[in-house]
Amino acid sequence: MMPVTQLFSAGQGQLQARRDSYVLLVDDHEPSLQQLRELVSLSGHPCVAARSGTEALRCCDACRPRVVVTDLTMPNLDGRALARWIQERHPSVPIVLMTGQVVEPRSLGELRRTFTAVLPKPIDVNRLLDLLDRLMPRNRQDDRSTSSSLP
């Protein structure tokens, strides 16, 4: 995987030339992150993979993502803390949570107020791709002229 500092360098990145046009994937489990990156890329969505919440912060600082898909449990900066940071700086960016933890009904309400969607692991691939298609349509002339929201 390419280091974050190179992702946004001219001619070297995984990103298209336009800002606001990529999915930021965050997971500290490298094999899962690579599978997710491949899946999202093959579906037609430009993406950047970050191996930690801290690395994800650097990505967001370098170029605001269109959508963030993050794991909940990560060392140092977990998915909740990452979501709070992103929401403070980029309140319009949808954040999708992935978790392998059993979520109590009471906690689920809190998570749904913080995250656009909560997806249990193992990830339902079709559900994730449908969600990304709604949040980030691929064939748009101008990202700023059209908005997409979940029902």
Image (cartoon, rainbow, N blue to C red):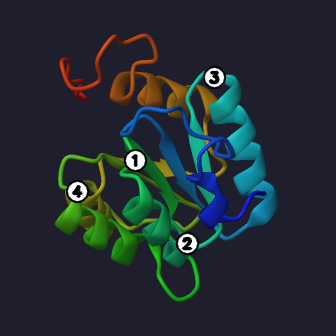
Circle number at residue 106: none
Q: Where the N terminus falls, by quadrant?
A: bottom right
Q: x and y percent of residue 29 in the render? A: 73, 67
Q: Quadrant of residue 131?
A: top left
Question: Would residue 93 appear left or right of 128 to someone viewing this image?
Answer: left
Residue at 19%, 46% in the rendered image: 92
* Residue at the spot 21% in from the left edge and 64% down from the top edge: 89
Query: Could you tell me which residue is drawn at 47 percent across and 78 percent down?
Result: 78
Instruction: Report if the CB atoms under discs 2 and 1 are less than 8 Å apart.
Output: no
Element class at badge 3 = loop
Residue sitting farthest toward the bottom: 76
Residue tagged 2: 55
Judging by the rendered image, the residue that carries numbered circle 1 is 65
Instruction: Report the side of 147 relative to 19 (left or right).
Output: left
Q: Quadrant of the C terminus?
A: top left
**For the residue carrying disc 3, how many other residues have a C-alpha within 10 Å: few (<14), some (14-19), or many (20+)?**
few
Measure the C-alpha gap from mark 3 to mark 1.
Answer: 17 Å
Report which residue position mark 4 lands on: 90
| Cα gap from disc 3 to disc 2, whole angstroms | 24 Å
Mark 3 and mark 1 lie on one chain; the one further toward the N terminus is 3
